[in-house]
Image (tube, grey):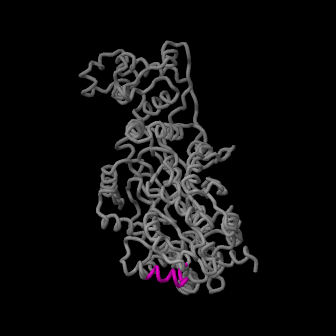
Amino acid sequence: MTREEYALALLRSCYGYDSFRGQQWDIISHTLDGGNSIVLMPTGGGKSLCYQIPGLMSENGFAIVISPLLALMNDQIDALQQNGIPALALNSEKSDHENRETVELLMQGKVKLLYISPERLLSEIDRWSTAITDRICLFAVDEAHCISQWGHDFRPEYTQLGALKQRFPHIPVMALTATADRITRDDIAQQLNIPDAKLFVSSFDRPNISLNVVRGSTGRQKLRQIVQFINLHQGESGIIYCLRRKDTEKMAAELTRLGIGAKPFHALMSAKEKQQVQRDFINDDLKVVCATIAFGMGIDKSNVRYVIHSNMPRNIESYYQEIGRAGRDGLPAEALLFYSYGDVVTLQQFARQSGQIQVNMDKLKRMQQFAESDVCRRRILLNYFNERFDHDCHNCDVCNNPPERFDGTRLAQMALSAIMRTDQQTGLFTVTDILRGWRKAEVIEKGYDRLKTFGVGRDLSVPEWNAYLLQMLQMGLFDIAYDENNHLKITEYGQEVLYGRQTIQLSRYQRQGFNVKKRATATIPMTTNTTEVSIASKEMDRELFEHLRDVRKAIAKASNIPPYMVFSDKSLQAMATEKPTTQSEFGILYGVGDVKCQKYWRPFTAAIREYQGSR
């Protein structure tokens, strides 16, 4: 048996997959040859197999997986153990006795994958005997962007990991991340002392995720749109990201009041409260979590069907990582981003308070351009990561609703005149109030209700004016003086338009709704996996799929594990399409490895036979 044949046999028996995806085998083969590597692969793209398979293939050795998050470690270990793979962790959540037992098992060669935090590894490894260190076949540094000061989630404890290559020069190092621009990749190689590392860049495209942006919505209108969106995803799991801790609590309370089960998640909650929310979410007992950006990093939940950003993220790396928590099973998923001028102001303030003002301001600007753009959003996203994507995706709001352009010169002159008549001493929201003719306290107090422009734009709604003003800002008709209470300042170009020496084109405002793809006829996306290809053209029985979800949840509850660790939605779709009634038929389905086949074939095939008998 060749090396590749052995790897494929492990892939089939342990994971239930027939073939490697993309560059997975190339990465594994390079590692087995002793090579260092930097692996950029999207969330849900199969990074973990790249280091798990070398660990399994090592005859007497094991791979060390360095991860910054205990929850992520525990989640992956539980999933691996469900597949019959000997994986353990050394961490502070375990007792000293449990950690000593783990070290003893390492000495005995009974562990193939050891998960550990960077600080724990650096303190432990000096105490390990050569009986353990001689067995290490790989150091896999997960979430490797954390080591770089240019990354979006810099963690100082990661910077000490360069010592590993100095002490163990012959053990390959694999750095893995889903988000790293060119400067971050170079810094990862330098920090880990692997200048010779081979770079493997997989496509960043997640074609199953629909990208959508809603501009200008605030307050009650945003809440109504979020409720509408969630109602289109009845019974499905989703995450709503909010900018501040208080926003998570407010959003969860509002949704609960409207009959949608939701809970907040943020740093000031107790560890017990956070663990309960996380447990309820991964067990499908809680469908909606309203969270700050920390939530989700420790969760490998495969059936999250949507991610909502209630506020614009601070950079594209964060946005990409967060939307990647949806649709990990490859099935259709939605990403919905709300963008407003208020977000820009707040995030500008955050950037100014950071240690790297210019870098963070530049990254924020790119995020703002993504949100404001009227070209295919996937093209912008992939081009940011230096991946050529020269066609429209037809799975984003811009592609599905191409903007209609019109001569917006008159509207621009209204807005610019209002700004000028306030002596350029007011902000965007007050300009909207003046144009709409709203007699708010500030407007009356400053005498703006007596301006000639007061009420000239009352025929347009607040969302319309917000959208058009954002376009004007993006086009450079005026700037925001952040050091002057965010007052608007007309540029030279804006003066050219104001005085009729230039005309401009605006994209016509469209009332934005949501076109959520139907699940009833969804099929497993066609891939190179032969099992998947064979069923791609068949229609799934939606009613049977829902019945199998109930069976899965009952099994998970009895076993005290999350439902997705029993089987992913993708595997259930395969069952609801192929309708296996024997062990042999069940064992060849997508995601059904040897251990899971033995454990679960009886209850699932019995449920299918019962369903067919009742038809």
> At which x and y percent is residue 349?
37, 37
| Point 31% across, 65% down: residue | 271
| Point 26% across, 20% down: residue | 446
47 lies above or below 207: below
The answer to whether one can see residue 305 in this image is yes
> At which x and y percent is residue 87?
51, 77
Q: Is residue 507 magenta?
A: no
The answer to whether one can see residue 521 in this image is no
Highlighted magenta segment, given as a residue range: 101-111
Classified by dominant secondary structure, the portion drawn in magenta counts as: helix
261 lies above or below 348: below
240 lies above or below 475: below
Say left or right for 362 vs 534. Answer: left
| Point 49% across, 71% down: residue | 115
In the rendered image, the residue lying farthest to the right is 2
Q: Nearer the viewer, residue 192 or 298?
A: 192
Q: Is residue 102 magenta?
A: yes
Q: Nearer the viewer, residue 491 or 185?
A: 185
Q: Nearer the viewer, residue 172 or 565?
A: 172
